[in-house]
Image (spheres, rainbow, N blue to C red):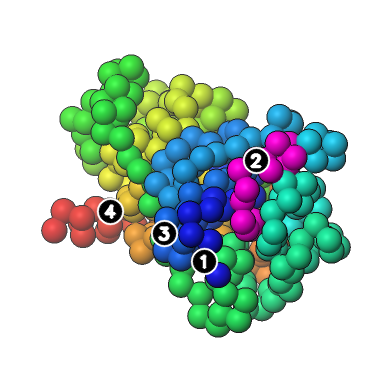
């Protein structure tokens, strides 16, 4: 169905990695509704990502904290959006509260998966076939495809990089590009069962610096102690955790030759700026949330207890991570480096 120039609304996910993957759905929407403005309702901390997605005309944020239910606030916000006369909304999260704003906004067609008995709030309800839609990105893209579409066209996210801001960030952080950069991304907001040991990152950093690299450790302020442990007593190693905004991370990652990352939001950011990603999986699954790029090597043990999708290892050993050795990852970094040079 075509809506001429009427604006469209997507209720987006709350996690950084999920928002990067959601760009695949935004890309499809812009191909289908080329002249319509696409608005995205999502938490404010994801807006720096949306600002780097050319498909998105405007980002909206609810005046709420993470996890707040606040049905009246959501209803009132939806009523304010009525003035924009959105013609269709796609609700990517499966929660009841996520569907409340499009309903209150009076949007004629409201599309989403059934989740939490959202009858009435949604009027274009899809049944989630987990066997066919076995990846997060497939679930997002399937909502914006025609209902009976069989073959999903999954495009790879591509975040816009600003070269002028790259230069500003290099100056502010007193960095240079005299050595090739290896990015280390040791955080994982979900929990420690997704985090490769910091001692392993440190060993890879040692090998990389000896081979002529510099190392940039990127993450939030929460990861600053990890960054300090990784960079300890190493020349050419820079702990940038907590020192950069998300948009700066986007621009700095684009300057790196390769990145080594847990299954995290920044892993998906690194993939979306076009660099080679070494993606390390512990409690999660590369089948469910893979980096959406052709330039990736995935490390996953596939143990009998994997994937458990737990924040903490229920068995107390985290062998799914410890069995992935620094030497194994470093050898792959070297192999990729040789192909990039040639």
> Which residues are the magenta region?
77-90
Which element carries disc 2, helix, strand or loop?
helix
Image mark for residue 178: none
Name the one closer to the observer, 20 or 286.
20
Q: Between label 3 and label 1, give the one nearer the viewer.
A: 1
Q: Which residue is mark 2?
A: 83
Q: Earlier in the sequence, mark 3 or mark 2?
A: 3
Q: Which residue is mark 3?
A: 34
Which element carries disc 1, helix, strand or loop?
loop
- Residue visible at 31% across and 27% down in the picture: 165
**Rendered-image quadrant of the N terminus:** bottom right
Compared with 170, 42 (above or below) is below
Number of residues whose C-alpha sits closer than 10 Å to that of mark 4, classed few (under 14), some (14–19) or many (20 or more): few
Q: Earlier in the sequence, mark 2 or mark 1?
A: 1
Q: Earlier in the sequence, mark 3 or mark 4?
A: 3
- Residue visible at 39% across and 47% down in the picture: 54
User: Where is residue 164 drawn, in percent x and y?
Assistant: 26, 28
Q: Which residue is mark 1?
A: 2
Image-based side of 12 in relation to 68, left or right: left
Q: Which residue is mark 4?
A: 334
Q: Between label 3 and label 4, give the one nearer the viewer.
A: 3
User: Where is residue 290 drawn, in percent x and y?
Assistant: 51, 61
Name the one closer to the observer, 178 or 157.
157
Which element carries disc 3, helix, strand or loop?
loop
Question: Could you tell me how far apart the alpha carbons at marks 3 and 1 are, in whole angstroms?
Answer: 10 Å
Q: Is residue 7 magenta?
A: no
Asked whether residue 326 appears in the rendered view, the answer is no
- Residue visible at 21% across and 31% down in the picture: 177
User: Where is residue 198 drawn, in percent x and y?
Assistant: 52, 38
Q: Earlier in the sequence, mark 3 or mark 1?
A: 1
- Residue visible at 73% across and 41% down in the picture: 78
Q: Are marks 3 and 4 in contact (CB under 8 Å)?
A: no
């Amino acid at each position: 169905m075509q809506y001429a120039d009427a604006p469209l609304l997507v209720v987006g996910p709350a996690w950084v990695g999920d928002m990067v993957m959601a760009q695949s759905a935004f890309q499809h929407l812009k191909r289908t509704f080329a002249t319509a403005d696409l608005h995205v309702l999502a938490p404010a901390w994801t807006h720096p990502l949306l600002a780097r997605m050319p498909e998105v005309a405007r980002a909206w944020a609810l005046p709420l904290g993470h996890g707040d239910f606040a049905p009246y606030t959501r209803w009132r916000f939806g009523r304010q959006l009525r003035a924009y006369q959105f013609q269709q909304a796609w609700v990517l999260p499966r929660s009841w509260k996520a569907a409340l704003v499009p309903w209150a906004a009076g949007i004629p067609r409201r599309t989403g998966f059934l989740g939490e008995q959202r009858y009435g709030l949604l009027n274009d309800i899809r049944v989630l076939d987990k066997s066919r839609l076995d990846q997060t990105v497939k679930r997002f893209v399937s909502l914006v495809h025609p209902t009976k579409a069989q073959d999903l066209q999954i495009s790879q996210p591509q975040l816009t990089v600003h070269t002028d801001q790259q230069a500003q960030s290099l100056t502010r952080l007193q960095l240079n590009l005299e050595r090739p950069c290896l990015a280390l991304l040791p955080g994982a907001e979900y929990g420690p069962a997704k985090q490769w040991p910091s001692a392993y990152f440190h060993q890879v950093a040692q090998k990389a610096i000896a081979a002529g690299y510099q190392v940039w450790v990127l993450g939030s302020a929460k990861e600053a102690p990890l960054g300090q442990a990784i960079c300890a007593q190493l020349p050419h190693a820079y702990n940038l955790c907590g020192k950069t905004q998300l948009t700066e991370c986007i621009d700095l990652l684009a300057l790196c030759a390769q990145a080594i990352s847990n299954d995290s939001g920044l892993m998906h950011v690194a993939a979306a700026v076009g660099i080679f990603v070494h993606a390390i999986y512990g409690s999660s699954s590369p089948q469910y949330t893979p980096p959406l790029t052709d330039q990736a090597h995935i490390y996953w043990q596939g143990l009998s207890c994997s994937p458990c999708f737990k924040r903490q290892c229920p068995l107390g050993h985290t062998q799914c991570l410890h069995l992935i050795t620094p030497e194994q990852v470093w050898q792959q970094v070297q192999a990729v480096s040789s192909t990039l040079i040639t």
